Amino acid sequence: MRRLAILGISALLAACGAQAAPQQAFVGATIHTVSGPVIENGVMLVRDGRIVEVGSADRLTVPEGIDTVDLSGKVILPGLVDTHSHVGGASGGDASAALHPGVRALDAVNVRDNSFRRALAGGITTVNVMPGSGHLMSGQTVYLKLRENPQTVDDWLFCEDSTHGICGGMKMANGTNPLRDNAGPFPGTRARSAEQVRALFSQARDYQRRKQASDDHDIDLGMEALLQILDGDRIVHFHTHRHDDIITALRLGREFGFDPVLHHVSEGWRVPEEIAEAGASASIIMIDSPGGKLEAVNLLWKSAPALEEAGVNTAFHTDDFITDSRLFLRSAGFGVRAGMSREKAIEALTLAGARMLGLEDRLGSLEAGKDADFVVLNSDPLSVYTHVEQTWVEGRKVFDRADPEQRKWATGGPGVFSGDSMHHHGHGGGQ
């Protein structure tokens, strides 16, 4: 299936010069590559923001004269990928309709919003910013790489063209949120919800036939976004909680030929085999306190091991502020406590999420050719005593807990995050 237009590993190696000397060496840490075994006393060589090689100190020699960062006693993970967040103040559709395929979160993200500081302090380097779930289709999501010193949102995009490119997925939802008691254009019932979605995709198919039949046709940007879904170029991110709603989301995907990424999946533990059989991925949240809406009453940690056992590609997300981005790392610990394997729990913070965004060729694991996005921890990733010490994006440090001002991003309350945020104070301690 086609995803975002991104460079493959071979192209990345060619771009940074496979034979050229690395510019940076990170040495001494325990490295969780995710795609391979854990490396004790590891070495990671980086050039031009991309990884050249990763291995053990007894196999890799650090070239003389390059910038060497000694991380002895520390732990390195790939940069965390948050598959579902609302940082940046992005918005989506309004009350004029229940489905807004042409609306883009990209047009509403404030890159100077302080919420991105919290994400960096939590080790998050890539985030899928979503519109809300109060619509059956609230609009297009946007995938952001949290590089240092952004001037505009374009500095963080994965797509090359923010006007016409595919810069994220499509947010859909079912269950109680978009019902709105049949208010105005909203459905009122679950059956009517599914019917409205079918009607819109049927219109998109008609639009596609007209477009193929004639070069003389009016362009409808919403329909064009739906065609990208039908053609497999845009990923559907589907908010869904109850098991019957999960099955409805899978049914709609089957009818219209897309494999949804299911989000929240509160009752995923009831239907893990059905999710696996459909080829869908599951982005789940691991909350540590009960409450919230009635349809999420069966949001249980046991979904994590059940989905893993069924073979479902499973990632964690924050839904920030449901989980503060600074606390994202602990989701893996919750997963293991529920019965997930260590390997899959760490993968659920990194590579599994990268797959859900179609960015696994660049993100999610530490291996040659991928972006040098990584997190430095003080201890075992699953320990309650572990915290993020540093966050690096493309070989540049964007968060450093040792900096007293930046430490506040990790430990401070609302008072720390008042004012004009990153634009005023700077963004990270880039090296």
Image (tube, rainbow, N blue to C red):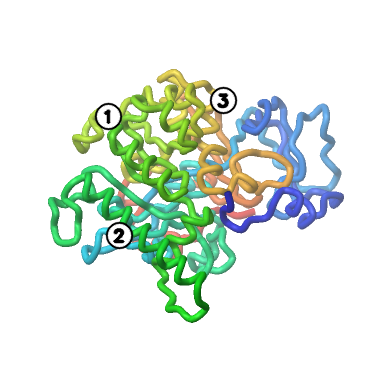
Q: Which mark is residue 99?
A: 2
Q: Label 1, secondary structure: give it.
A: loop
> Whole-Å distance between the Cαs marked 3 and 1?
25 Å
Name the amino acid, label 3. Answer: Glu
Q: Nearer the viewer, residue 330 or 212?
A: 212
Locate residue 314, reporting x and y percent.
48, 33
> Whole-Å distance between the Cαs marked 3 and 2?
38 Å
Locate residue 403, reporting x and y percent.
52, 47
Residue 108 visible? The answer is no
Where is residue 301, by image quadrant? top left
Locate residue 34, reporting x and y percent.
62, 32
Q: Nearer the viewer, mark 2 or mark 1?
A: 2
**Which residue sits at x=46%, y=48%?**
258
The residue that label 1 is drawn on is 289
**Which residue sits at x=39%, y=57%?**
88
Name the amino acid, label 1. Answer: Ser
Q: Nearer the viewer, mark 3 or mark 1?
A: 3
The residue that label 3 is drawn on is 343
Of labels 3 and 2, earlier in sequence is: 2
**Which residue sits at x=37%, y=46%?**
252
Name the amino acid, label 2. Answer: Leu
Q: Label 2, secondary structure: give it.
A: loop
